[in-house]
Amino acid sequence: MDTRDEDRYAPLHPSAHVDRFARDNLPPRAQWPDFIARLPELQYKARLNSAAELIDSWIARGAGERPCFITDGETLTYAGFAERVNRIAHALTRDLGLAPGNRVLLRGTNSPMMVAAFFAVLKAGGVAVATMPLLRAKEIAYPLNKAQVKLALCDARLAEEMEKARAGAPFLERVVYWGEGGAGSLERLMDGAGYADFAACDTASDDVCLIAFTSGTTGEPKGTMHFHRDLLAICDSYGRHVLRAEAGDRFIGTPPLAFTFGLGAIALFPLRIGASSILIENTTPPDLIAAIARHRASVCFTAPTAYRAMLPLLKAHDIGSLRKCVSAGEALPRATFEAWREATGLKVLDGIGATEMLHIFIGSPEEDIRPGATGRPVPGFEARVIDEAGNEVAPGTMGRLAVRGPTGCRYLADPRQQAYVQNGWNLTGDTYLKDADGHFWFQARSDDMIVSAGYNIAGPEVEAALLTHPAVAECGVVGAPDEQRGQIVTAYVVLQPDADASAEALQDHVKATIAPYKYPRRIVFVRELPKTLTGKLQRFALRRLVAKD
């Protein structure tokens, strides 16, 4: 490794934070991953405010009248969005006492106010802690306490659970709501005289600006800490080299802003190139496809299940404006990729990302896609497949995925940092193999490998085979304890509406699709599968279920 590119031990730039909680709770420097930034576009100046870079720079370039955020009710230009951000930033600093480094909890749907509040916190030098809109009080209290949040900005429609959360959040001093119009509302505070302009806080490029909490699919959520420069780095790596969108594009997506996949999809990527973003609050597949047609969206971000669910809806909607489709959150089954390409002519860009890494770090552009593979490392990142001792394995051999690049894991005061980062590499918890051409092929989450009668069977591979059967809408595959085999492959299957298929028929289909020893020896038909708020299948919930059976 070229140590000139490593900043694991390099001194941080002088912080603009008066409240040093975030910087003081970064992991010990010896536990940081190696941060590499060998591409010229990933070299950032010492003083950097990401909100100013992503928004104000377009005003300075004379692009203020470009459409920025679009909803069914309004269209905000870059100048209009900048003013809204500035007004909220003034309300935060003058009326609500925000000091640089203070954490602010944000709760809302994907709306212009939610996005504006996010960037206002950053512009004022604060640290944004965004949360999923469907969280309950106990789940809201956790990040409030972990990040010692004193102030929250919240959509008034989400007030009930927000108010319940206060009882279990001793650090929280004030909640300000938008959307209600009352005397103490955010809208009233934004109306201050002289609030249209706001000078961005002189933050360091390595000041923390975001604490994003993981979805908790493997246990208690972890707070991941990201710098101002990190928000630009994912735009200048994945956005620039893989997505390759243009200023005339209109982005749309279903992941919430609090999910870092959504943060990139609906905010960072379009803002970095001066494009537009269509914000939708109802994010079911029917809502998504209708909004694509209605607003002529050209770049779509959503999960594999949504692409599959939109297939039967294509005849009723003109989505000819689409030119790029991105999938992440779960591995993209080849059957879904092929069905979408056949129906639309578009190749779905698969990718793997992590909250710890902020966004996608493996994924290929259209001309380098190999159906079924996740792709190659995004320019600016390095990836390898390693064994339990940390040694890189030969091509074609399954092992643990290790990655490093311009972003990486920094947990908020969490001993799990030592498990995620080892020898300078981020270990994502995924089992992969790399082929001789450098494409990475997802096998399973490392805890989703099923060992049955001595065979290693990847649950997602069996899921992909099941999904090629026309009667299967969704499925989840886990290992069930078995005295003779150790484990047996067990599939939980949701059938398509009005479809009918026997367990035996699905088993025969899998045997004919992949190696017969991988077929699910037990199939359970269910109405729905357990999922996180971001749409990820909760296989741990299936493992708990199968243990009870």
Image: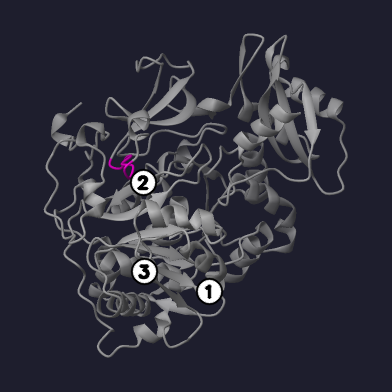
Where, by quadrant of the figure, is residue 285 drawn? bottom right
Residue type at the position of mark 3:
Glu
Residue that numbered label 1 is attached to: 71
The colour mode here is one colour
Residue 224 numbered mark, or none: 2
- In the rendered image, is residue 82 in sight? yes
Give whichever of 425, 375 is nearer the camera: 425
Give the mark nearest the N terminus, 2 or 3: 3
| Residue furthest to the bottom | 193
Q: Position of residue 179 (x, y in %)?
A: 50, 80
- In the rendered image, is residue 300 in sight? no
Q: Residue at x 34, y 76 (%)?
A: 88
Quarter of the rendering occupied by the C terminus: top right
Quarter of the rendering occupied by the N terminus: top left
Residue 467 numbered mark, or none: none
Where, by quadrant of the figure, is residue 35 drawn? top left
Residue that numbered label 3 is attached to: 173
Work out whether 63 lies above or below 400: below
Is label 2 in contact with label 1 (beta carbons under 8 Å)? no
Is label 1 in contact with label 3 (beta carbons under 8 Å)? no
Q: Position of residue 139 (x, y in %)?
A: 51, 54
